[in-house]
Amino acid sequence: MKADLHIHSTYSDDGWQTPEAILARAADCGLGCVAITDHNSFEAFFRIKSSDIIIVPAEEISSSSGHILAYGINKKVNDRMSVIDTINAIHEAGGIAIAAHPYRIRTGLGEKNIIPEFDGVEALNARSTKGANLKSKKFAESFGKVITAGSDAHRCTSIGEGYLVIPDSCKTWQDVIQAIKDRQVRAFSSNCGFIESLRYVTESILNWVKRGFHSV
């Protein structure tokens, strides 16, 4: 089963797709599981009433040093905390903490901030360049914990470009979390090319200006 564990909806200030549109696109792409990881928001999970697709409760949290993915949480986790405080808050909310796109400019944590308390690393991200993904994968393998992947889709057309293969036996989001913990997953992703990178940078700058020059 394929699981795209990094998707943004309109509950992110830079997301273009509703949670309902995400699920429709995921079904068209043959995905069996998604995580809607909005920036510092946990609203999308409660908006979705029912689906044939497994939905992992999730959030992408802006720590003081970069972005952290939280999977399996039971409540919103506050942003702008230190890395260790964010990880602890994720664990207290029943979730696992994954270092998102480590080498992303501005929002990546970098190696120095990826501490042993993390549960894993998102080594493959479809919005990252080939070089950044290769570097992330090499570091993640040396880190020795689970490796995850996701499309980081902000538009429906990008959903499924990065994903984990998880056991077909997974029936609930709790099963998915356990499979990640047990490392019964394999990560795959495309890479962001020059045109996509240029569009991403342009959109990021425009959103940064719209936010009043505040980081996500």
Image: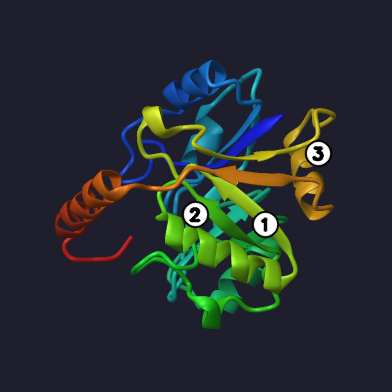
Q: Quadrant of the C terminus?
A: bottom left
Residues at circles 3 and 2 in contact by the CB criterion of under 8 Å: no
Residues at circles 3 and 1 in contact by the CB criterion of under 8 Å: no
Cα distance between the residues tagged 3 and 1? 17 Å
For the point 54% across and 26% down, the residue is 48
- Crowdedness near tag 1: few (<14), some (14–19) or many (≥20) residues, C-alpha within 10 Å: many
Residues at circles 1 and 2 in contact by the CB criterion of under 8 Å: no
Secondary structure found at label 1: strand
| Picture quadrant of residue 77 | bottom right
Q: Amino acid at mark 1?
A: Ile
Pointer 2 residue: 60
For the point 44% across and 55% down, the residue is 130
Pointer 3 residue: 175
Q: Amino acid at mark 3?
A: Asp
Vertical arrangement, residue 201 with respect to residue 199, above or below? below
The label on residue 101 is none
Q: Position of residue 131 (x, y in %)?
A: 44, 61
| Picture quadrant of residue 55 | top right
Vertical arrangement, residue 180 with respect to residue 68, above or below? above
Vertical arrangement, residue 28 with respect to residue 179, above or below? above
Cα distance between the residues tagged 3 and 2? 21 Å
For the point 53% across and 61% down, the residue is 134
Q: Quadrant of the N terminus?
A: top right
- Crowdedness near tag 2: few (<14), some (14–19) or many (≥20) residues, C-alpha within 10 Å: many
Would you say residue 20 is visible in this rendering? Answer: yes
Viewer-proximal residue among 56 and 166:
166
Secondary structure found at label 2: strand
The label on residue 147 is 1
Relative to residue 11, is residue 174 drawn left or right?
Answer: right
Vertical arrangement, residue 64 with respect to residue 44, above or below? below
Q: Earlier in the sequence, mark 3 or mark 1?
A: 1
